[in-house]
Amino acid sequence: MRPATYKQLVDRYAGAIRRGELISGAKLPAHRTLAREHGIALATASRVYAELTAMGLVVGEPGRGTFVRDQSGYAGIDADRRLPSDRLADLSFNQPRADAPTPMLRDALRQLSTSGNLESILYQQPAGGRRHERSAVATHLLDRGIDITPDSVFLTNGAQQALDVTLITTTRPGDVIAADALTYPGLKLLAAARALEIVPIPLCGDGPDLAGLDSLCATRSVRAVYLMPTVHNPLGWTLDLAHREHLVDIARRHDALLIEDGTYAFLDVDAPAALQTMAPERTFHLASLSKSVATGLRFGYLVAPEVYATRVTSGLRATGWGVPSVVTALATGWIADGTVARLEAVRRDDARVRQEIARNALRELTYRAHPVSMFGWLELPGEVRADLAATHLARTGILVSTADAFDTTGHWPHALRLALATAAIDELGEVLETLRTTVLSVPW
């Protein structure tokens, strides 16, 4: 019989998976077995599985084999958030409840409507924001231990734009970015859009393996290192001062930039100094008010080294210019009058209670989280697959995020990231009990 070409094999397996002839979780032949059965080279067999993996149809697991991925759409970086049943809770996305800021919003809008400077918000503001609003953010950052001039602050349309501007300001297509083996999914999306290569930093206990990062920088030309040193998403660690000093030393020795994501840093008031304070000449520090105030506010900021100011301004102009004037007026007004600080305190108290609920409800399972955070990392027991777990949980009305959304290695663990901030706090315990029961009882 004429040997099958690899394209024919790809089409055959893809069709069988999409038609449901190969069910979710089915184990496919080993590479050598596939090569022998179809009279193809081992490298060709590997190419078949590589294409099926790129299509999102299979996943290879070191030491276990290649398996059919669940096709229901509830796993991965662009997971479906529509449920096949009545919704119990969305644990896939952190959208802190906005009940507390609502009266404040009404008051702030009334004050804005009667201000003598109302007409000014109808005019286009400079890219990066007006100086008095940048000054408000600079003052706000003093509470984080970051002491900079307003000229170093750039207002952005959320932290995602701040990250995008940082990448287009500092990198070229083909450059290498180092990031934790499990990291923020938005970085992966931007890196793909900007043709950047993400190389993973191995995990080591409660933090990145810095010896591994040092070795990586010695063997690859790493342009920048993306980090979440305070309340890491999704694993929840906060790096101690010694780890931060070591990171700065590695960056300086290898002339790599540091991208410090402080989106969740407000949750840990006892964290060591920000990387920006330790290496201001090479650190881009970014954050937003999305998690501390409201996700719909879309107000972020970027602190950049002085030598990059002109390029950052150009990057802002190329990526939507900046934040609407109404939003900057509202956000910086809340920063100046202490509203943001008060809401951050409320969020911290809420996060602490939610973590206590989660630890109690997820007993018998391996769960890790910062004690004051909005999410946790649940390692699935035994042979439980994350994609199948996400589908079964969706059928009970619970949405979750799977580990592959955060993975930079291509060999992700079977685990779930649970966003705890969206569900009503009086319902969270019951939701997590349902999740625990489902994970432990379904015949995987």
Image (tube, rainbow, N blue to C red):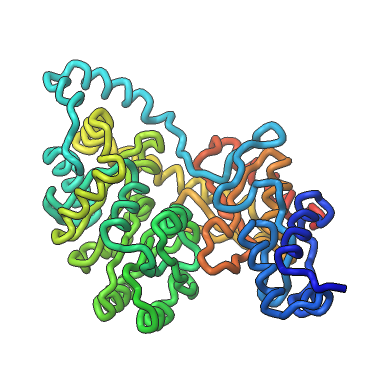
Answer above or below: position of 213 versus 231.
below
- Which residue is located at x 24 percent, y 34 percent? 328
Residue lying furthest front? 2
- Which residue is located at x 32 percent, y 26 percent? 104
Answer above or below: position of 405 versus 411.
above
Q: Quadrant of residue 345?
A: top left
Q: In the image, 103: left or right of 280?
A: right
Question: 335 and 425: which one is in front?
Answer: 335
Residue lying furthest right? 1
Of the 4 image quadrants, the one containing the N terminus is bottom right
Looking at the image, can residue 96 be seen? yes
- Which residue is located at x 28 percent, y 74 percent? 251
Answer above or below: position of 133 versus 67.
above
Answer above or below: position of 359 versus 257.
above
Q: In the image, 258: left or right of 134?
A: right
Looking at the image, can residue 359 be seen? no
- Which residue is located at x 21 percent, y 49 percent? 314
The x and y percentages for residue 374 are 47, 48
The x and y percentages for residue 401 are 58, 51
**What count of labels does the image hold?**
0
The x and y percentages for residue 321 are 25, 40
Of the 4 image quadrants, the one containing the C terminus is bottom right
The x and y percentages for residue 336 are 19, 37
